[in-house]
Image: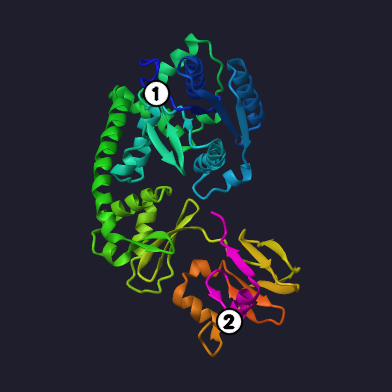
């Protein structure tokens, strides 16, 4: 940014700076504010109040004052500190997950033209490389941060990755920028702080160019991983299948690959689905729990609100299912009317009664023992057996059962429809539709 004052690019229509109030994001916001008129882009800032420090409110106020002075609209998003503290991977990971969990949905509301700009610099890149090396990451992981990337459908831009923190400090001092110093940055209880405060200074005393070397290694790993991604993506067509409109992978084809190739193909597949990357430990869990040759394998690998599941020798990547839990609910549908019922798992039942008579229905979760008479069958069949034949287990737990007022099962989710329902639908033009839980 400092060596290339205009970043050497055509700016996106809308740039949103992730503004913590620290020196890095302060320098980035100031520089972009100076460039917006000449380049004609819209500039916003977003600040996450984590609520972890007694100073959090003061930091939000500071960010507001800075943005007012630069005439930049600021949005403050408030986090739940209890959720951060309870994160399974610790406070650092919890705070990072919370930031993305708040900012990305807000960014998507701004539209596809909006780009999130973050103040990560080359020292951050070097630290990230070393952290990931200590965790045993693959070349893709060691590639660390890219200048341009995307996450959950949001474009992310890191224009400072080639700048050193010292250069940003000089820029901030030269322009008399105010910034926040978070006291927690001095605590070596956090891994990144320990590297920054203890390890990197020691390495730098012996090898002054250590940060540059680590950052360069990250760049080379990224180039290699991109080349591997292209190769892995070329393998996907032979392994990909479709189920219920979703892309799945053939498990037998995956088993035929060696473990390293499987991991790379999985990364390429998840990237094609625009899903969060799978952590290294999850690849190991996949090898242990999901490569069983049994068709009825019930293993689950869970990460970032998603799951890998196996059904009928196919690998599925799904959102964590919203299981339906509810007491039976009676619904009165007047004649010539439409009634919508939102269920506890955020799915939706829509009743369209086009007949001249009111109808009453009962919605419930599956409790076991239900039977349904399907078209072209002269007997009632077990709902459990029918669903086991054609529906993955994670969909079964989400599906409601709809009964007529006499208790006869008419529908199960959007999979099973009874003869009785078919007669009513054909005679009156009425319908009952179930919309699956929203992602």
> In this orientation, which residue lies closer to the viewer: 107 or 321?
107
Q: Where's residue 77, x and y in %? A: 62, 35
Q: Are marks 1 and 2 in contact (CB under 8 Å)?
A: no
Residue 15 vertical placement versus 237 (above, below): above
Residue at left 23%, top 64%?
256
Q: Which badge, 1 or 2, comes first in the chain's sequence? A: 1
Residue 109 lies within the magenta run: no
Q: Quadrant of residue 247?
A: bottom left
Residue 219 horizontal side relative to residue 398, left or right: left
Disc 2 is placed on an element classified as helix
> In this orientation, which residue lies closer to the viewer: 244 or 89?
244
Q: Which residues are magenta?
A: 413-439
Q: Where's residue 393, x and y in %? A: 49, 70
Q: Quadrant of the N terminus?
A: top left
Residue situated furthest bottom in the rendering: 378
Residue 432 lies within the magenta run: yes
Which of discs 1 and 2 lies nearer the camera? The answer is 2
Count the labels in the image. 2
Residue 89 vertical placement versus 167 (above, below): below
Residue ID for mark 2: 419
Q: Where's residue 221, x and y in %? A: 27, 38
Residue at left 49%, top 42%?
93
Checking the image for residue 257, the label placed there is none
Residue ID for mark 1: 10
Is residue 22 visible to us here? no
Q: Quadrant of residue 60?
A: top right
Residue at left 35%, top 15%?
3
């Amino acid at each position: 940014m400092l060596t290339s004052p205009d970043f050497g690019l055509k700016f996106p229509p809308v740039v949103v700076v992730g503004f913590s109030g620290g020196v890095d994001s302060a320098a980035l916001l100031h520089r972009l504010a100076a460039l917006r008129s000449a380049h004609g882009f819209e500039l916003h800032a977003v600040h996450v109040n984590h609520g972890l420090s007694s100073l959090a409110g003061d930091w939000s106020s500071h960010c507001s004052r800075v943005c007012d002075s630069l005439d930049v609209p600021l949005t403050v998003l408030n986090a739940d500190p209890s959720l951060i503290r309870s994160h399974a991977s610790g406070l650092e990971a919890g705070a990072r997950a919370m930031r993305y969990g708040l900012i990305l949905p807000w960014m998507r509301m701004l539209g596809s033209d909006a780009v999130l700009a973050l103040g990560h610099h080359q020292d951050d890149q070097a630290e990230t490389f070393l952290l990931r090396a200590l965790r045993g990451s693959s070349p893709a992981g060691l590639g660390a941060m890219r200048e341009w990337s995307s996450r959950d459908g949001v474009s992310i831009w890191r224009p400072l990755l080639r700048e050193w923190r010292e250069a940003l400090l000089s820029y901030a001092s030269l322009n008399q920028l105010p910034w926040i110093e978070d006291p927690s940055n001095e605590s070596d209880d956090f891994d990144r702080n320990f590297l920054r405060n203890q390890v990197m200074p020691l390495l730098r005393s012996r090898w002054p160019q250590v940060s540059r070397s680590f950052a360069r290694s990250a760049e080379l790993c990224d180039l290699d991983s991109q080349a591997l991604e292209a190769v892995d993506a070329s393998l996907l067509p032979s392994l990909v299948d479709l189920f219920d409109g979703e892309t799945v992978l053939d498990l037998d084809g995956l088993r035929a690959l060696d473990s390293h190739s499987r991991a790379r193909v999985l990364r390429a597949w998840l990237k094609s689905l625009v899903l969060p990357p799978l952590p290294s430990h999850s690849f190991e869990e996949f090898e242990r729990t999901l490569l069983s040759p049994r068709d009825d394998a019930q293993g689950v690998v869970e990460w970032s609100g998603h799951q890998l599941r196996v059904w009928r020798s196919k690998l599925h990547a799904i959102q964590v299912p919203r299981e339906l839990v509810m007491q039976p609910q009676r619904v009165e549908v007047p004649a010539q009317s439409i009634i919508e019922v939102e269920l506890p798992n955020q799915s939706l039942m829509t009743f369209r009664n086009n007949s001249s008579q009111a109808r009453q229905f009962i919605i419930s979760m599956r409790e076991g023992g239900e039977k349904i008479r399907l078209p072209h069958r002269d007997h009632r069949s077990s709902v459990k057996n029918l669903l086991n034949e054609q529906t993955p287990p994670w969909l079964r737990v989400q599906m409601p059962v709809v009964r007529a007022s006499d208790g006869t099962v008419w529908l199960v989710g959007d999979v099973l429809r009874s003869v009785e329902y078919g007669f009513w639908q054909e005679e009156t033009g009425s319908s009952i539709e179930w919309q699956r839980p929203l992602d």
